[in-house]
Image (cartoon, rainbow, N blue to C red):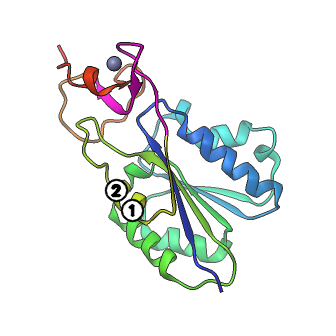
Amino acid sequence: MAMAKIEVITGPMFTEKSWELIERMKKFSYAVKRILLIVPGKDNRPERNIIKMVRQDKDLGKYSFIQWYPASEKDETEELINTFQPHMLAIDEAEFFDYWMLDLIDKLRKSKISEELTIAVAGLDMDFEQRGFGIMPELMAWAGNVKKKTTVCFHCKQREAKFTYRKSKEKKVIIVGDKELYEARCGICHAIPYE
Ligand SMILES: [Zn+2]
C-alpha cells in the first residue's frame, strides 16, 4: 500500500518553475514511469506553454509513457487519471485551476493506492496583491516538500524578488500576461504604485 505524496514548486512569475517541473518529470522518465502532465484549459499563452517545452525537450519529446492534457473539468480529468494510472501527476500553472482540482487532489492524497504516486505542482503562491493564489495555499499546506523559488528584483536589480508585480491598474485577479504586464519584484519595490 502507498499514498500519494505532494511536492510544490512555487514563487513569483519568471522564476522558471515550469523548467523545474520538467526536470522532475525527466527523473521519472529515466526510471520509465508513467507521467501525466496537466495544465489549466484556460491558460492560453503559447510561448509559455509547458506542453511546447516538453515536446521540444530532447528526452521527454521522444518519451512514450507521457501524456499531456489541458484540463477544465473534474470528471474527465479523474477518468484520465484512473485510466492512465500515472506514477507522476505533474500540474503546471496550478493557481489557475478552480476548486474542483483541489477536491480531486484531496481525494487522490487520501486514497490508498497500490503504486507510488507523486503529485508535483508548479504555480504562483501569491497573486499580484500578495494574496494566496487560488488552490495554492492548500496545496502548499498538504505538500511534504515546498520549494520557493526567487529571482532578482526586476526594478531595483538588487534585492531578492518574492512577489509578482502587475504593471497596470487592472484589479481582476487573473489576467493572463507575460513581461509586458508583470515583473518579479522585492517587497520594497512591490509597494511602488503603478503610474
Ligand atoms: Zn526591488
Beta carbon at label 2 within 8 Å of ligand 1: no
Q: From the viewer's perspective, tell me whether residue 72 is left or right of residue 86.
A: left
Q: Are marks 2 and 1 in contact (CB under 8 Å)?
A: yes
Q: Secondary structure at mark 1?
A: helix
Q: Amino acid at mark 2?
A: Pro
Q: Hey, which quadrant is residue 66 in on the image?
A: bottom right
Q: From the viewer's perspective, tell me whether residue 79 is left or right of residue 99.
A: right
Q: Secondary structure at mark 2?
A: helix
* Ligand 1 quadrant assignment: top left
Quick one: label 2, few (<14), some, or many (20+) residues within 10 Å?
A: some
The residue located at (77%, 61%) in the rendering is 65
- Percent position of residue 72, x then y: 43, 59
The residue located at (46%, 74%) in the rendering is 75
The residue located at (52%, 49%) in the rendering is 92
User: What stretch of residues is rendered in magenta?
Assistant: 149-166
Q: Hey, which quadrant is residue 2 in on the image?
A: bottom right
111 lies above or below 142:
below
Quick one: label 1, few (<14), some, or many (20+) residues within 10 Å?
A: few
Q: Taking the image as drawn, is residue 33 in sight?
A: yes
Residue 48, labelled with which disc?
Answer: none
Q: Amino acid at mark 1?
A: Ala
- Percent position of residue 58, x then y: 81, 38
- Residue 128 highlighted magenta (yes or no): no
Quarter placement of the C terminus: top left
- Percent position of residue 121, x then y: 51, 54
Beta carbon at label 1 within 8 Å of ligand 1: no
45 lies above or below 111:
above
Find the residue positioned furthest to the front. Answer: 159
Q: Hey, which quadrant is residue 11 in on the image?
A: top left
Q: CA distance from mark 2 to mark 1?
A: 6 Å
Quarter placement of the N terminus: bottom right
